[in-house]
Amino acid sequence: MKKLRLILGDQLDSQHSWFQEYDDNTIYVMAEMRQETDYVKHHIQKVVAFFLSMRNFYTTIKNLGHQTVYFQITDSTNPQDLEKIIALCIEKYKIEKFEYQFPDEYRLDEQLKTICSKLKIDSEAFDSEHFYTTRHELSDFFEGKKLLLMENFYRNMRKKHHVLMDGSTPVGNQWNFDANNRKKYKGEVPVPSEKNFQTNVSEIVAQIKKTNIVTFGNIDVQHFSWPTSREQSLAVLDYFCKHLLKHFGDYEDAMHTDEKFLFHSRLSFAMNSKMLSPKEVIETVIAFYHAHETEISIPQVEGFVRQILGWREYIRGIYWKEMPNYAQLNILKNTNKLPDFFWTGNTKMNCMSHALNQSLDEAYAHHIQRLMIIGNFTLLTQIHPDEVDAWYLGVYIDAIEWVEMPNTRGMSQYADGGIIATKPYVSSGSYINKMSNNCAKCHYNVKEKFGDKACPFNSLYWNFLDEKKEYFKGNQRMAMMLNLLNKINPEELYKIKTKANAIIENMDSY
Ligand code: FAD
Ligand code: SF4
């Protein structure tokens, strides 16, 4: 029987069971499509990374002997739309059955179901074989529970998959070393430079420009840094184990103006495109740890494992549990617009300038920059979560909706009313000062609440608490913050709120 198998741009897993068998009657189709480049405005590096990784994957499976069809973005025969591409291939190759792997995005899942319902031939969907969990495993795990605590899910995952376990006891006699992950980075240990592949991507960038795809952000076309093949992805993993793992946990929450990546792995794109599986990443890291136990401590390893076995799987489970309603949530009823400086990086706030310019230059910011600088600012200025989501979905190399949206709309913007975070991740300037060196060189004074030189985060923080106090009054975890708010005398609060509103009304001049 002649089969057509679809491979989406984030399904680049050459270890998938599909590729372990050979059949001349099976044709694999891959396509660069306007449908995928245009649903949100993407960073140029994100488009390049996906197209190049797809092309490399196509070459890999073709060289392995599989029948493969590929549509480049500039091909005149490319219909640029999934339904039309499938129809074209079915007709051209006289296909009798259509097969695909379950997509990770709700949007594509719905589209593929609709396409299949209209086909006159049989169709079948297969597991992507990528995640530890099935789509609905988290829903089953939390069945009947009010609080969907990540920690409970994570411990269960550790036990179920026997990861960092000594019988029924967690290795190191502790499930979680989060308290050890909060060091400020003061240059005590040098940060190795990132693994950079220096790929020349000028040809692909020229193709993207030729098709008038609207992108943003910067790119060095001679020295593209991200991994775009399985071999390069494995090299990033190897580099992480050898050079970064030993300090990963210590500086996980740190920020520094001279260090863009600190000890972070930069593995998210390789994993989200499925060039690497989470299982092989975790197993490689743990094996390396066991071979180097005298140099690497357990909090570094547990901190890393928690991000992937815990957070990554949890976030995916929340997405499938809550979609499609999740995409509409705006519990705090925020309505403001994103300021222009999110697209230019042009602001006097040093912390925002660093985090935004780095995002525009590298298509990357690490977790704490995304959460406690940029996300903190958008929540404090009460920007509509749709605007925040669209920006995060476009800017980061690793941004695919299943992982971007629960992190942004949920964890960072609290638009889901606490499904993920039990309290909003907001802070005044003092947290940023504690965890980074940004404030020392800032135009603003982190100690001041009002006045021309006052740190904007300070007035915005108290204003946010005051504006949302009715909503949060029953939340025990907010009680201390709201008590402090109550202690501010009315005259001072008035001045703070006047300042905050002036910032919100004219964000681009700050
Ligand atoms: P490391 O710090 O080295 O962590 C290792 C791995 O753990 C990551 O590669 C990632 O796969 C996983 N991980 C860590 N935290 C999370 C998390 N919260 N959710 C899921 N996986 C996690 N991650 C994405 O992959 N895509 C996104 O679009 C995305 N958007 C985010 C938006 C916001 C507002 C926030 C706060 C976080 C977001 N994250 C997202 C999670 C996290 O910031 C990135 O996974 C991480 O910065 C990627 O860099 P790294 O590979 O160097 O990570
Ligand atoms: Fe950011 Fe305020 Fe510190 Fe400036 S003073 S870097 S705006 S927190």
Image (tube, grey):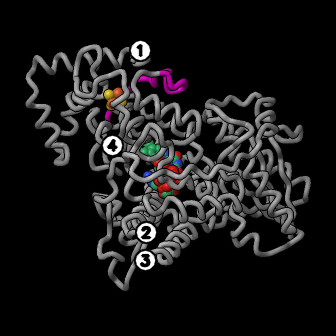
Residue type, mark 3 in image: Lys
Indicate if the residue with disc 4 has its beta carbon within 8 Å of ligand 2: no
Question: Which image quadrant: the N terminus?
Answer: bottom right
Rounded to the nearest whole Å, what is the CA distance between mark 1 and mark 3? 52 Å
Report the residue at 15% width, 21% height from top.
493
Q: Report the predominant secondary structure element of the magenta stretch.
A: loop
Residue 336: in magenta span: yes
Question: Which one is closest to the eye, mark 4 or mark 3?
Answer: 4
2 or 1: tag closer to the N-terminus: 2
Between residues 6 and 123, which one lies in front from this camera angle?
A: 6
Chain part drawn in magenta: 332-346
Q: Position of residue 334 (x, y in %)?
A: 36, 29
Q: Is residue 119 above or below residue 434?
A: below
Report the residue at 78% width, 48% height from top.
31
Residue 410 seen from this side: no
Question: What mark, if any, has residue 435 been given in the picture?
Answer: 4
Q: Which residue is mark 1?
A: 509
Residue type, mark 4 in image: Met
